[in-house]
Amino acid sequence: MTTQEKSGANLLQDERYKTIDRTIKRLNRREDALLEVLNTAQEVFGYLPQPVLRYVAQQLHVPLSRVYGVATFYHMFTFEPLGEHTCVVCAGTACHVKGSERIIHTLSEAFDVRPGGTTADKTFSLTVTRCLGSCGLAPVVVVDGQVHGKATPESVLAQVTHILSLAEMLKEGAR
């Protein structure tokens, strides 16, 4: 058995690839299912590693360049694993006008993480997106999946600090 065949056999044993396959099958292997398939892939892997992108291209019979094109166009996709905790800051027009840049700067400084990056210890990722569609609540942030409107640098910093402190205490308690 060649290395590529062994690699393919290992993929078939990985439940995450089976989940992608179920999504592809449910959508009848249509090329226009690419966005939903990539979303499923990111949900199960936590990000979109290169082997997964190649697999999706192969399974949907679309060029890898098209898969990369879609994955890089949408800011919801990431090519590196995110941290254990995440903060998404909206940088759309309304949020920008209401101070989202100050929130980004505050978090970046406080946790030594660049926008779009993850801390060295992999506990926190700071993501910036073009728009979250909640302009009436500007500025908007999403911390660990929870939407918070009318955010301030101080309120978001306090919330993220609290979440990371709790996580650290839980880790210490588990030791």
Image (tube, helix red, strand yellow):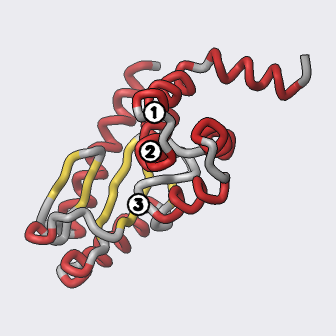
Amino acid type indicated by mark 1: Asn
Q: Residue at x 52, y 44 (%)?
A: 47
**In this rendering, the label closer to the viewer, 1 or 3:** 1
Left or right of residue 11, residue 67 in this image: left
Q: Mark 1 points at which residue?
A: 28
**Residue 82 seen in the current view:** no
Depth-wise, is mark 3 or mark 2 nearer the camera?
2
Q: In this view, does 164 lie above or below 18?
A: below
| Nearest the eye: 62 or 124 | 62
Q: How far apart are marks 1 and 2 (CA)?
A: 8 Å
Q: What residue type is labelled 3?
A: Thr
Q: Would residue 32 be found to the left or right of residue 140 on screen?
A: right
Residue holding disc 2: 33
Real-space CA distance between mark 1 and mark 3, rounded to the nearest whole angstrom = 33 Å
Q: Where is residue 30 in the image (x, y as percent from the top left)?
A: 48, 41
The residue that appears at 62% across and 49% down in the rendered structure is 62
Could you say which is closer to the camera, residue 93 or residue 85?
Answer: 93
Residue 172 visible to an observer of this rendering:
yes
Secondary structure, mark 3, is strand
Outermost residue to the right: 2
- Compare marks 1 and 2 and give the one earlier in the sequence: 1
* Type of amino acid under label 2: Ala
Q: Which residue is drawn at 68% across and 40% down?
A: 51
Task: Give residue 78's position: percent from left, percent from top.
Answer: 51, 53
Q: Which of marks 1 and 3 is nearer the N terminus?
A: 1
Q: Nearer the viewer, mark 1 or mark 2?
A: 1
Quadrant in which residue 163 is drawn: top left
Other-residue count near label 1 (Cα within 10 Å), few / some / many at <14 / 14–19 / ≥20: few
Name the residue tied to disc 3: 127
Q: Does the residue at mark 1 contact the one at mark 3 (Cβ under 8 Å)?
A: no
Residue drawn at point x = 37 percent, y = 74 percent: 105
Residue 67, how many percent across, how many down? 58, 53
